[in-house]
Amino acid sequence: TLSDRLTTVFSSLRGKGRLSEEDINATAREIRLALLEADVALPVVREFIAQIKERARGEEVSKALNPAQQVIRIVNEELVEILGGATREIRYAKNPPTVIMLAGLQGAGKTTLAGKLAKWLGAQRNTPLLVAADLQRPNAVTQLQVMGQRAGVPVFAPEPGNGVGDPIEVARGSVEHARRNNHNVVIIDTAGRLGVDAELMRQAADIRDAVTPDEILFVVDAMIGQDAVNTAQAFLDGVGYDAVALTKLDGDARGGAALSIRHITGRPIMFASTGEKLEDFDLFHPDRMASRILDMGDVLTLIEQAQRTFEQEEVEKMASTLASDDDFTLDDFLEQMMMVRKLGPIGNLLGMMPGMGQMRDQINNVDDKDLDRVAAVIRSMTPAERANPKIINGSRRLRIANGSGTQVGDVSGLVTRFFDAQKMLRQMKSGGGFPGMPGMPG
Ligand code: GDP
Ligand code: MG
């Protein structure tokens, strides 16, 4: 995958001096292949690589970062840039209702997205109205009604028994209805086809002309890879749109679609859909997507934060403890937890560290009060117990609990957690260490 490749590139750079032309070319080649593998369109890859090369050459030697970290930063920044920079917000109409129209192929996730968007808007004190303008398939209206029910948002649909109905009339009528009933946002779900065709485009364009939407959202399945670009272009020509909603990002889509669509259409990606539930939805954050594509967590933020907070020696000490072959002791465990606390919220920090997901889940359950208790327990142990917690039997546990003002269960829980952490560390060490950490042998 892209992230694997990039990780390989970066680890081969680690420990080098300043980036040479040769380094830059080798890195660029790897990144190029990686992006192509991730289904990023060729023109986008070319431009991206040119950008990276130019910046890598012009970059001054950083005192704070080694060359690999410098490249990570450049790649990350350029990814964010190419994904659109800042998050794009909805533009509300001066005179409500704000009309949002969804367009896209069948199965792209329009109807689901309509429900998600309605719920999301409702939570922000809007009074949305869902509109069933997909009258192509018999159950399309019902599907939207189910979404509306779950989202707690009313659905405007043609009266049953009135025949099939005309989607353009429904759309037009819905805006009137919204105005009379104080709905400040109208979300129009439209019909899709399996492929791009003229009839589909005509209908969407007619709905557009009937209601002049404030936002037309092109909804596209991130899993369809290169095809997403062609479809995006066809809808841009046939209907036009203001922004893009990427769906099915919970699948193993590698981010290529996001990179390409943004670049080729010039339209920002506004929403990201990450599952079938209504809650699996958020504004699209280019920085998060870049991290996802790199799949390294926000390594750079971690590096910067670490450098601000620690003296370099401290960092190196922690790194060498974690990387050394000596067994990890309870003293190390305590020290590490304290350092982690110094760095900021435990969960955030560990979330930024690549490969630390498991560790985070472990330590995430530890809040500050918990940490004080852990410290008290460890400080009540003898040096022998700290160095070799296996000797902590029942009577020792009781003594430690009494000495630290905790319960025997706290002592046992800590020891268990420590053994888990130790095991995890051994696994990580045998798995190649921690990419990107300053002073960390890879
Ligand atoms: P439409 O034809 O464009 O209206 O697409 P639908 O909203 O009916 O979605 C098609 C299928 O994709 C449905 O089975 C949805 O549950 C599913 N779906 C939609 N969005 C997502 C998503 O973000 N993740 C996943 N895993 N499935 C999704
Ligand atoms: Mg639908």
Image: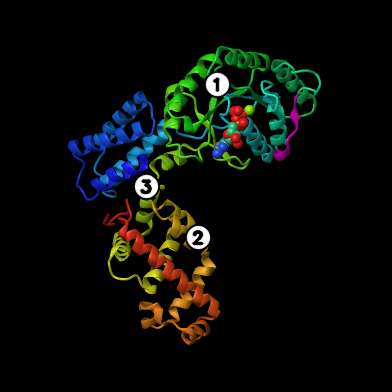
Q: Residues within 10 Å of mark 1 (few under 14, many from 20)?
A: many
Q: Amino acid at mark 3?
A: Leu
Q: Residue 259 in the image: x percent, y percent?
A: 42, 31
Q: Residues within 10 Å of mark 3 (few under 14, many from 20)?
A: many
Using the numbered discs, state the Cα–Cα distance from disc 2 to disc 3 in whole angstroms: 21 Å
Depicted 88 relative to depicted 430: above or below:
above
- Toward the viewer: 124 or 148? 148
- Toward the viewer: 379 or 294? 294
Does the magenta run of residues contain 201?
Answer: no
- Which element carries disc 2, helix, strand or loop? helix
- Toward the viewer: 142 or 43? 142
Q: What residue does disc 1 label?
A: 241
Q: Residue 154 in the image: x percent, y percent?
A: 75, 33
For marks 2 and 1, the one nearer the N-term is 1
For marks 3 and 1, the one nearer the N-term is 1
Q: Residue at x 48, y 77 (%)?
A: 376
Q: What residue does disc 2 label?
A: 364
Q: Residues within 10 Å of mark 2 (few under 14, many from 20)?
A: some
For marks 2 and 3, the one nearer the N-term is 3
Tag of residue 300: 3
> Image check: 251 left or right of 167?
left
Q: Residue at x 24, y 43 (%)?
A: 61
